[in-house]
Amino acid sequence: MPSEPAKKAPAAGLEYCELCRHHHDLGRRHRYGRNHRDKLGAALTRFRSKLSDLRRALLHGSPSSQPPRSRLWCPFCSIDLVDLDDRSACSNAIYHLASGEHLKGVKDFLRKHGGGMDQVDSLRISEDEVAKWEKGCKSLRTGAKTGTEELIGPSLGPMKDIQNESTCDNSDTFARTNIPSFSNTASYVVMPLQNPTNGAYHPISTECHGAFGSGNASYSAPYGTVGLPITAWGSAETHKQQGVLSTNCFHGTGPEMNGHQPTIPGNGPRPLISFAAHVQQSHSGGNLSCGPKANVHTGAPPPWLKANEHDSNNLLLRSCGAPGKGKSRKLNPKRVGAAWAERRRAEMEMQKRGEFVPETSDSSWLPNFGGVWQSGTRKESKKDFEKTLKLHDKKSNHELSLEIKPYISKRMVNAISQSLFHI
Amino acid sequence: MGSALLPTLRQKREVDAAIRDTLDKVFVLRFGRAEDAACLHLDDILAKSSWDISKFASVALVDMDSEEIQVYIDYFDITLVPATIFFFNAHHMKMDSGTPDHTKWIGSFSSKQDFIDVVEAIFRGAMKGKLIVSCPLPPERIPRFQLLFKDV
């Protein structure tokens, strides 16, 4: 039976799979291999999680469990979407993910690597979401243009804006209101904290104020439960975020929110503002720097350096207390030959210093050795050996002292003497 | 010939100095001949491992054909070649590897790691104050030999 033709196509050639990161000559069959499918699944899952974080942060406004990303690599189009924190760049990312090019890239990727085409929608941002986001941005912009309005609400604790020490013109206006916490009106937003802190307070931007102050009838709040505008939640880390409140403000306030909720819906801007203000206070995002918290912007040293200082201090204490650590480690005093080692070390140091050291070793020195047929202690076996050594030496000396002379018979002696006599 | 990396000792005072000056480290002394195939294999393993164990052990080779070394050959009762003897602070370390002779290692090691494991076991035992340690290697990796009784 003739051998089966080679299964591989002779003209397949080597191809490089970007997912598996290796060359293969399997052609299209490579896509159905287990490794490739696993890697494809992992890559798509990773991108989906990043996309969902971005979507949540920018569009829905809720913070993600992970810190917001500063860049996002689109593997389908091989584009690096940088500075997701900045609203202008975010828009680039959103527009890219909603663009036709990205859609094409996704389809090509899935076609090339074998993923199902039903996954396309989960790997991009839809036009509806883009539209909602654009509406939110517009509402923010229009809200920022309006003047300041009286903000009525419960008196909140003192507000500290560590980034913006200068006060704007509106500060007086705000100060006159029942909400002294709005005295600082930063032109940019200090994002509210997600977790409550020790009374730290984040000011909201004038846009927020304006947004709340204006007739909010124009706002549509598809996600909010309290009728407040949905704005993009930028990076919670930076203070440059121009975005305003996120829906998380509305969702996560807890008991304080509950108290205000009945007053808010349909009551116009003022209760909304008060609610927002209160929301602001109750939120404390872990990622936000607010109040007395030290961070890069305040010029505080990083925690690892502080930790190092602390550790070094501790080390000093520890080293004083426990001299066994570090270079001055003490060896076990019960180790084999400890006493001998200490003595020898002292002798060597004396020799190094040039001091006279009595010669302790001679040619007959032998190390401590437990013999193969050892019957007693090692010292005894050593003594036995030295005795046998001496005996051997004596025997050898005795043998050497005997001269070996040739045998000369009497006849030879007579012959030699006669020959000498004749001479 | 020996190994280029390991010192070859041919005189008794050199061996004495090496044993006495190695403090708080295992001193591995190989007795053998450079021409012997098993010695060459062992020397290769010792040379390659010497750096790895340099922090807790040092290795030296002894030429058995040297005259001055004969006293050590008698003292250590070396009959089979190669023979590796271990010292710690000038005290001889024994190892129970299941062979009749616990005072030395006869033959070569199957791999570098085996040698390192043996030296490590000796070091650990010595630091605990033990003069005899158990061999960490499995029996199949320990060379077997016959030892004749001294009066036979």
Image (spheres, coloured by chain):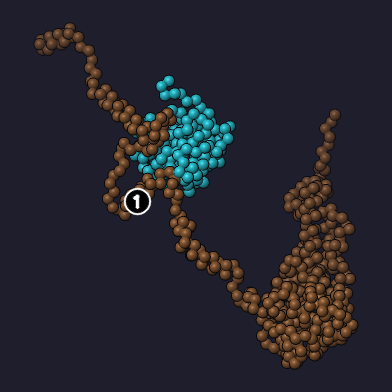
Could you tell me which residue is drawn at 82 percent across and 50 percent down?
Answer: A31
Residue shown at 26%/22% (left/top)?
A399
B27 is higher (above) or lower (below) than B107: below
The image position of residue A315, as x and y in percent, is: 50, 63
Which sits in the foreground, A198 or A102?
A: A198
**Image quadrant occupied by the N terminus of chain B:** top left
| Secondary element at tag 1 | helix
Query: What is the letter of the cyan chain?
Result: B
> Quick one: which chain is brown?
A
Q: Residue at x 58, y 35 (%)?
A: B138
Q: For label 1, count other residues whose C-alpha is less than 10 Å away and answer few (under 14), some (14-19) or many (20+).
A: few
Classify residue A289 as left or right of residue A141: left
The residue that disc 1 covers is A346
Vertically, is B133 above or below A141? above
In front here: A151 or B53?
Answer: A151
Image quadrant assignment for residue A148: bottom right
Q: Nearer the viewer, residue A284 or A422?
A: A284
